[in-house]
Amino acid sequence: MKTLNDFNFSNKKVLIRVDFNVPLDEAHKVTDDTRIKAVKPTLIKILEDGGSCVLMSHLGRPKNQEEEFSLKHIVKRVSEIIGVQVKFSTNCVGEQTSRDAAELKPGEILLLENLRYHKEETEGEINFAKQLASLGDFYVNDAFGTAHRAHASTAIIANFFPKNKCFGKLLEREIESINKVLKDSQKPVTAIIGGAKVSSKITIIENILDKIDHLIVGGGMAFTFIKAQGGQIGNSLVEDDKMDLALSILKQAKQKNVEIHLPVDAIIADSFSENANTKESPIDKIPDGWMGLDSGQKTNAHFAGIIRESKTILWNGPVGVFEMKPFSHGTISMGIAIAEATKNGCFSLVGGGDSVSAVKQFGFEDKVSYVSTGGGAMLEMLEGKTLPGIAAILD
């Protein structure tokens, strides 16, 4: 795997696909700059070598080049984080953009306008990729969040740099972290899979069963397993058409000597509301009119015990509706146990949108080994898929 450290970028104009798809408030101010900070080491390496950087990114899903999706809104924040005044080009292709890139001097950074202002980007159009490629003499992909898309700037463009291409430091670390779970893990390995639906996680579960020792199932998806085994789950979230699938997963796990840990109790509520009446109940004896919205105390203690004994942990999905305070305790309990295990030498990888939100919300971000920057991309890697943006660099 070719990385930045294999090259010297002196006097090189480096075209870098970054993921600056960051949230903005109504005043167009960046509200979460994690993704910008994540690419700083890549940019600093190139600048310190004496190279210049041409940055490409998308922002949101524009339909008609709406002004709210312009990357000009983030120039100030990117400049502050990198410590270099970033120049901005009002397009990502065309004569003016070519001039902007040609005039770039060593040590300078140019940010191009939103790639998705052109439909050719998401269509993976070759001529559009060729125009982008003409702006630099070396290509770096450091956008894990879009690595699962075969877009012009992530997969097609790499063909124009047969020898002069590599992963950035962020993408390199993402790949290494996932490989630490899937290929080079220290045992015992525990996967915590939560969230609402079994159907959205089935491929991941099937792909990782050969690689793990413990599977903790939490969140709404746990109720499909409980009901499939004859439990009463009241009005809890369930996928009735996936109960056979749940039983199949339990059977596969047993055959592979993987221990599956399901909740034994739950915090239940009489409505899906922060102000609902709540009480604790065995997970398989939830009365009609009540729904499980968080894991109970016995479950939290049991899950925490498994986690503390682990040497490798993958956390994908919360175990309760953590956005509402009364139902956040299970997810917080998981975070505390994972932080303790990490402190004791365990490798912990957190990924998938809601888990990442929970880790940030409750202050665990710096207490786990790695927080992935790519939701969909990480899930597809865990499913065992080859990502186009990664394959293009390895070719």
Image (spheres, rainbow, N blue to C red):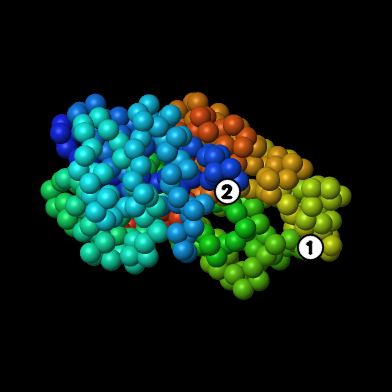
Tell which residue pokes out farthest to the right in this image.
277
Circle 2: residue type: Asp
* Residue 393 in picture, x, y percent from top left: 23, 51
Quarter of image, res 209: bottom left
**How dense is the environment of label 2, judged by Cα within 10 Å: few (below 14), some, or many (20 and up)?**
some
Please report the residue visible at 17 percent of the width from the left and 55 percent of the height from the top: 160
Which residue position is annotated with label 2?
A: 354
Q: Earlier in the sequence, mark 1 or mark 2?
A: 1
| Quarter of the figure that contains the N terminus | top left
Quarter of image, res 151: bottom left
* Residue 21 in picture, x, y percent from top left: 45, 48
Quarter of image, res 198: bottom right
Circle 1: residue type: Gly
Q: Which mark is residue 283?
A: none
Tell which residue pokes out farthest to the bottom in this image.
241
Please report the residue visible at 46 percent of the width from the left and 40 percent of the height from the top: 74
Please report the residue visible at 84 percent of the width from the left and 51 percent of the height from the top: 276
Q: CA distance from mark 1 to mark 2?
A: 25 Å
292 or 91, which lies in front?
91
Kind of element beneath mark 2: helix
* Residue 237 vertical position relative to residue 349 in the rendered view, above or below: below
Q: Are marks 1 and 2 in contact (CB under 8 Å)?
A: no
44 or 314, which lies in front?
44
Which residue position is annotated with label 1?
A: 234
* Residue 197 in picture, x, y percent from top left: 60, 61
Please say whether residue 355 is visible from this viewpoint. no
Tell which residue pokes out farthest to the left in this image.
163
